[in-house]
């Protein structure tokens, strides 16, 4: 039997990611999630491999994605818009 493709989903235990993960599992893929809570109860009964995500550490992020064929990012990057887009001429 050929190896099953690995798909990585951010937040596969959360609102949007759980639907993506369920469809991927139903299609026969291996699924890994990158999550803030890797020790949280796995709603997929252990079928989804959980890893902490490290968007701020390139080496750890690369390790988390190693072997993946596809990456689904459902993580909403939050930042302070006012600070990042402040017009310096108005300060």
Image: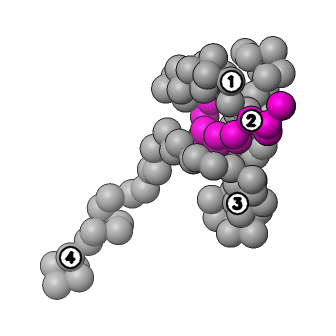
The residues bearing labels 3 and 1 have C-alpha atoms spaced at a distance of 25 Å
Q: Where is residue 65 in the image (x, y as percent from the top left)?
A: 70, 54
**Along the line of sight, which residue is nearer the eye, 6 or 40?**
6
Q: Which of marks 4 and 2 is nearer the N terminus?
A: 2
**Along the line of sight, which residue is nearer the eye, 43 or 83?**
43
- Residue behind mark 1: 28
In the rendered image, the residue lying farthest to the bottom is 89
- Residue behind mark 4: 87
Q: Do the residues labelled 2 and 1 touch (CB within 8 Å)?
A: yes
Determine whether, in the image, residue 62 is placed left or right of residue 72: right
- Residue behind mark 3: 61
- Residue behind mark 2: 4
Q: In this view, does 81 lie above or below 35?
A: below
- Report the residue at 35% width, 68% height from top: 84
Q: How is the image coloured?
A: one colour
In this view, the mark in front (3 or 4): 3
Magenta segment boundaries in residue numbering: 1-14
In the rendered image, the residue lying farthest to the front is 1
The residues bearing labels 2 and 3 have C-alpha atoms spaced at a distance of 22 Å
Q: Residue 4 magenta-drawn?
A: yes
């Amino acid at each position: 039997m050929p190896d099953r493709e690995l798909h990585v989903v951010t937040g596969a235990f959360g609102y949007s990611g759980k639907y993506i993960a369920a469809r991927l599992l139903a299609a026969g893929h291996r699924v890994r999630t990158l999550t803030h809570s890797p020790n949280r109860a796995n709603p997929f009964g252990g079928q989804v491999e959980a890893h902490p995500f490290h968007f701020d550490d390139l080496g750890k992020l690369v390790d988390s994605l190693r072997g993946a064929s596809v990456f689904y990012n459902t993580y909403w990057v939050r930042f302070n818009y006012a600070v990042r887009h402040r017009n310096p001429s108005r300060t």
